[in-house]
Image (cartoon, rainbow, N blue to C red):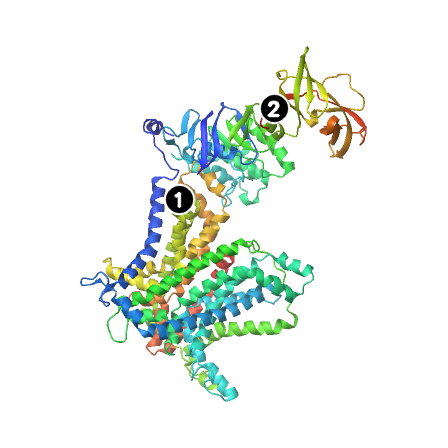
Amino acid sequence: MTQSSERNRERRPRRRSELGLAAWIIIIAGTALAIYLIAVPLLMLLFTAFRGPSDFLPFEPGAGWTLGNLIDVYTSSVLYTRIIPDTLIFAGGSVTLSFTVGFTLAWLIERTDLPARDTWFTLILFPMLVPSIVLAIAWIFLMGPQAGWLNVALEQVFGVKGVVNVFSMGGLILCQSLATIPFTYLLLSSALRTMNPSLEEASGASGASSLTTFRKVTVPVLLPGLLAPLILVTLVTLEQYELPSVIGVPAQINVFSYRILYELNPADGLPNYGGAAAVALPFLLMGILLLALYNLAVRRADKFVTVTGKAYRQRRLELGRWKVPSMLFLSAYVLLAGILPALVLVWTAFFGFAPPSLASLSSFSAEPFQRLFASREFWLAIRNTFFVAAASAAIITMLGGLVAWVVMRLKFPGRTLLDFFSFMSIGIPSVIAGLAIMLLYLTLPVGIYGTVWILVIAYSYRLAISTRLAKAGLLQMHKELEEASSASGATWISTQWRVVLPLMRPALFSSFVLLFIVGVREFTLPLILHSPDNVVLSVLLWRLYQNGDTIGAAALGSLIVLLVIPIVILARRALSRSS
Amino acid sequence: MLKVTKLTKSYGAVQVIHGIDFTVPEGECYALLGPSGCGKTTTLRCVAGLETASSGRIEISGQVVSDSERGIFVPVHERPIGMVFQSYAIWPHLNVFENVAYPLRVQRPRVAKSEIRERVNSVLNTVGMLKMADRSATQLSGGQQQRVALARALVREPKLLLLDEPLSNLDAQLRITMRNELADMIQRVGVTALFVTHDQAEAFVLADRMAVMNGGFIAQEGSPREIYRIPKDPFIAEFLGSANILRGRVGELAPGGRVALHIHGGPDLTLAYETPVSAGSEVDLVLRPERLLLSAEKPEIDTNVFEGRIRKLSFQGNVTECEIDIEGGLTLRAVSALDDDLVEGMPVWVRAPHATVIPAKQAA
């Protein structure tokens, strides 16, 4: 303490916080940025729904207040006869199927003596890391009504034609479930892992058989813990755009996420901004409602002390004669969701569209790959994909960490609101986020529209994952570790830099990796905001496919799968840390 | 020197400290002792600056660090303190040397690297951890962590050392060893220290002076010996170690420091008293079990003697605890190191060489 500052303190009494000015600037700027990234686009969306004419941007000269958009959308019968029923059937069917299969997989791997559990775990994870658009195209190659491999195989063996048709509600539900199962599996396996095994042992010791124990103890105890994953899976399924557009649209299935994009690029010309915003509003509301329900469910599950954050060493059930059927079940999933799609892409890229046969071997050609490598767009897409994924993951991880710290360590009245705000980002379907961002930056004269920066900003609204991981990390960190630093004479910034950040590194690393994967997979946002300059791999793939270059799409798809493999290893580390 | 004046602290409507005053002179070690929830840790955290006092004044070495009236609040990192935390809070990402060097590394203006090395090594030497300077913090035992925490608190030569339950994280055996070493080290460094504990033995060994806290007030302040021997009220008496407390009425004052004491529902007693009593007053007689002498024959001294019968003996290794029935259905607990000739059911005389009489509280 210098003399002058002491004298200063004596003369002019003041109350000072432990946080210095710089600390407050960082906290306030970070919090404001977090709110801006989520709230401002949504506000814009809200305005747009009430501004017209509908092909005008909300604040373009000539636009004014109107209820016309809402009236147009909500009085049109297509909403009630097609969009709502299709959305509900699609979501209901996919959630049911993926939950059933996901639970079975999780139970087999977590609670039975199934061999090679680690390998299964990795294989199950795989489809979650590949962009859905790649899988969608692969599944079309596999289950297309005429030339799909499965149909050709069935025809050759049983002589029946066109049994499997991916372009149907059933096909869409099957594909969406295959894509969502890894996510469901992860949520459920952590619920299973945190169940106290002595509850089941007590049942056994009371004379109950394994099956009775499962029925009377395992399921009832797990039930409150299953509600939250169920809501989350519903939310994630509802916001899907990739499969509904690639597989659903040829089958005349019209879910809301596709509808929003359709309003933006209708077959007959001018973009209908107001209409798109009006369609988006109720689904946004539904997302946020589901999220509030999720919060409630989590809080309820917390009341059951039996399912805590602690992982137990589980007693494993001996499968016995069920071992072979169980392995077959797992193989079927892994084959359909991972191995066959990868194979069909690679095969098609090298040998063309015909299913594997001796004759088609002669048509080997690496030309599609050469064509890709020679194109400027391909390299641009690679650069953009990784840059946007890495930049947004870094931004979100830092912001999420800051928000988590503010919520957990600063006692200010608005913190639960801030917490819910960041959490709410899960409830915003990416189609709606994309639309909102587009409206905002078409209106704001900042000149980032059409550049990669708008993608970085758009991806960065997903704060929830990193806030959650950072909160978990902070929870594990004893508060005295920070206090010891202050008591050693360190300023707030010094404490963050020298103690909090290093100790949070594992949590922040997990958050970065997961968000990087989400960023690489991203399709809907870059599609909505797409321009020649900011093309990413998933969008490039979609364009090749749409322009009829199926073989080129297959080649690009195989390359994406190849890129994903090292990420699987990273992801396994990140996931095992976070759960 | 630490001076705390009229300190209060409330959380919302709940007041946890009710205006306490105490002073720790330069170089003394002062203990705040009390049951959990008595406000001792909150007091310590207010002194550290980790909590903001609701009102009152805190002065460290002549510098006012907190004064509600003048609106002064010096944040924790600008107070001239060193602190040992209950969990030790050793940073797992830094090794022993870097943990201890930390306060110097964050100091501004910067401390020269050579000086940091010198000072850290010297303080590590003081706590006996110099050989482990390169050890990772996660490989330390509880006792070693405690030494590192102490070294870290001392390295920047604080005006005041704060210790929050410094021994409660250690197992029983180690706690006794470390208690004595800690007392040694604090004394050797000569730093002014304030520490918080719920264990009276720790306070007795470590503190020059101590305050027993209860319900947000200081119930009694003094040297450990004073407080143990002459507790102000039954709560303090019982908190500082087990005690037999008998309520009675003082009778006639007799010459030679003797007085007749009528124990309610029990025997009459001739009491030799050390603290002043007045005839006819209600008092509590405090008898420490380990200070009671047992004999099979009637002792020659006739003051402070009870006649009774051993109801139960429980052998505890180093000592034997006896429950002794005395007149009127009352029971005395006594602890004896010499138990060879004691048997359950035998008649016994109990003499208390030191008996403390404290005025009975009306409400209690």
Crowd tier of the residue under label 1, counting other residues whose Cα lies within 10 Å: few below 14, some 14–19, many 20 or above = few
User: Residue under mark 1: which chain is it in?
Assistant: A
Identity of the amino acid at label 1?
Answer: Phe
> What is the x, y in percent for residue A12?
32, 29
Residue located beneath label 2 in the image? B360
Q: Secondary structure at mark 1?
A: loop
> What is the x, y in percent for residue A266?
28, 73
Q: Residue at x 75, y 29 (%)?
A: B325
Residue B195 shows in the view: yes
| Quadrant housing the N terminus of chain A | top left
> What is the x, y in percent for residue A112?
61, 65
Query: Looking at the image, do the residues carrying marks 1 and 2 touch, with CB atoms under 8 Å apart?
Result: no
Q: Nearer the viewer, residue A284 or A78?
A: A78
Residue located beneath label 1 in the image? A412
A438 versus B54 height, above or below: below
Where residue A375 sits, quadrant-wise, is bottom left
User: Residue under mark 2: which chain is it in?
Assistant: B
- Is B129 situated left or right of A15 in this image? right
Q: Nearer the viewer, residue A426 or A574?
A: A426
Identity of the amino acid at label 2?
Answer: Ala
A90 versus A23 height, above or below: below
C-alpha separation, residue under disc 1 versus residue under disc 2: 47 Å
Residue B257 shows in the view: no
Where residue B147 sits, quadrant-wise, is top right
Mark 1 against mark 2, which lies toward the viewer? 2
Q: Secondary structure at mark 2?
A: loop
Where residue A524 sits, quadrant-wise, is bottom left
Q: Residue at x 55, y 68 (%)?
A: A104
Disc on res. B231? none
Do pointers 1 and 2 mark residues of a single chain? no
Crowd tier of the residue under label 2, counting other residues whose Cα lies within 10 Å: few below 14, some 14–19, many 20 or above = some
